[in-house]
């Protein structure tokens, strides 16, 4: 697949087939991830690859629980009957054959304590780049992914316990990895009004927010902003 196609055809996949992912493909997406840039080349990442079926089911269950409790109920304030409707999107999640847990791990003490906030921001940017590389490489192989940030909502406590991740290592994101039957998602052009008029608790506005991508001309400025 062309690089541009892999980047633009990638979409967040929730329904997977249970077929295991070949180890070579897992290694390939991880190689893409660690090719990402990082501040002072500190490479502040660690990855936990979960392929053991029972463990994968428990990771799936945790992600689904956090999705409901933290994302839909607390963060987005979705009304109760609609939460149940949205949770059906995750009905087949127990099928996911592989998860990659992306962690922030500092190895070099390369900047003083007074720069701690900046360093964390930079490290998270770098992990984002690693995730983007990983997801593009997976799309290139015909595999699905989806960025789950919800473990950050509870400090990743439950996943750390489940996977033996040490206290000082931070869980930043998790993605399922596997084959799927979903066609590339429709990408209608989304109006900026959808964002400006968004109201938490309004299910129609949430549905609109989750659809499409803003037009290039709404997010790109040439030479001067505006
Ligand atoms: C930082 C970040 C956190 C996210 N967290 C979640 C999450 O907790 N649960 C989920 O289902 N999707 C999550 N997503 C996926 C987004 O909802 C998804 O990328 C967005 O709706 C755009 O759809 P697309 O990935 O198909 O382009 C997250 C994405 C990002 C970048």
Image: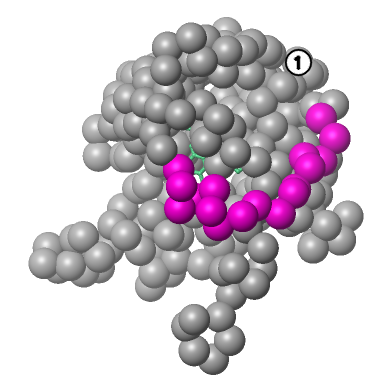
The N terminus: image quadrant: bottom right
Point out residue 61 in the picture as x, y percentages from the top left corner: 50, 12
Residue pushed farthest left? 114
Up-down relation of residue 92 to residue 39 (above or below): above
Using the rendered image of the protein, determine whether residue 138 is visible from the camera's viewpoint: no
The structure residue drawn at horizontal position 35% and vertical position 35%, both measured from the top left corner, is: 152
What color scheme is it? one colour
Residue pushed farthest bottom? 223
Q: Is residue 90 rendered to the left or right of residue 66?
A: right
The structure residue drawn at horizontal position 81% and vertical position 30%, both measured from the top left corner, is: 182
- Location of residue 40 (image quadrant): bottom left
Q: Which residue is mark 1?
A: 18
The structure residue drawn at horizontal position 71% and vertical position 54%, both measured from the top left corner, is: 189
Up-down relation of residue 169 to residue 94 (above or below): below
The structure residue drawn at horizontal position 55% and vertical position 62%, both measured from the top left corner, is: 36
Per the image, is 161 magenta? no
Using the rendered image of the protein, determine whether residue 2 is visible from the camera's viewpoint: yes
Per the image, is 194 magenta? yes
Badge 1 density bin: few <14, some 14–19, many ≥20, Cα 10 Å = some
Quarter of the rendered image showing ligand 1: top right
Q: Which residues are magenta?
A: 182-198
Point out residue 135 in the picture as x, y percentages from the top left corner: 66, 47
**For this rendering, which residue is in front, 38 or 85?**
85
**For this rendering, which residue is in front, 72 or 31?**
72
Task: Kindly state the secondary structure of the residue where label 1 is placed.
Answer: loop
- Location of residue 18 (image quadrant): top right
Up-down relation of residue 103 to residue 4 (above or below): above
């Amino acid at each position: 697949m062309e690089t541009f196609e892999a980047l633009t055809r990638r979409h967040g996949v929730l329904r997977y087939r249970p077929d295991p992912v070949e180890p070579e493909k897992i290694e390939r997406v991880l190689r893409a991830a660690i090719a990402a840039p990082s501040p002072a080349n500190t490479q502040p990442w660690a990855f936990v690859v979960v392929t053991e079926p029972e463990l994968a089911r428990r990771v799936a269950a945790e992600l689904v629980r956090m999705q409901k409790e933290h994302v839909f109920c607390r963060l987005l304030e979705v009304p109760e009957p609609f939460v149940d409707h949205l949770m059906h999107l995750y009905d087949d999640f127990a099928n996911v054959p592989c998860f990659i847990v992306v962690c922030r791990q500092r190895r070099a003490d390369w900047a003083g304590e007074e720069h701690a906030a900046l360093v964390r921001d930079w490290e998270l940017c770098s992990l984002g780049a690693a995730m983007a590389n990983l997801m593009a490489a997976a799309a290139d192989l015909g595999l699905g992914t989806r960025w789950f940030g919800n473990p950050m909502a509870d400090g990743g406590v439950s996943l750390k316990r489940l996977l033996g991740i040490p206290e000082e290592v931070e869980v930043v994101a998790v993605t399922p990895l596997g084959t799927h039957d979903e066609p590339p998602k429709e990408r209608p052009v989304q109006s900026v009004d959808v964002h400006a008029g968004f109201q938490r608790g309004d299910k129609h506005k949430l549905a609109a927010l989750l659809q499409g991508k803003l037009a290039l001309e709404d997010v790109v400025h040439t030479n001067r902003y505006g």
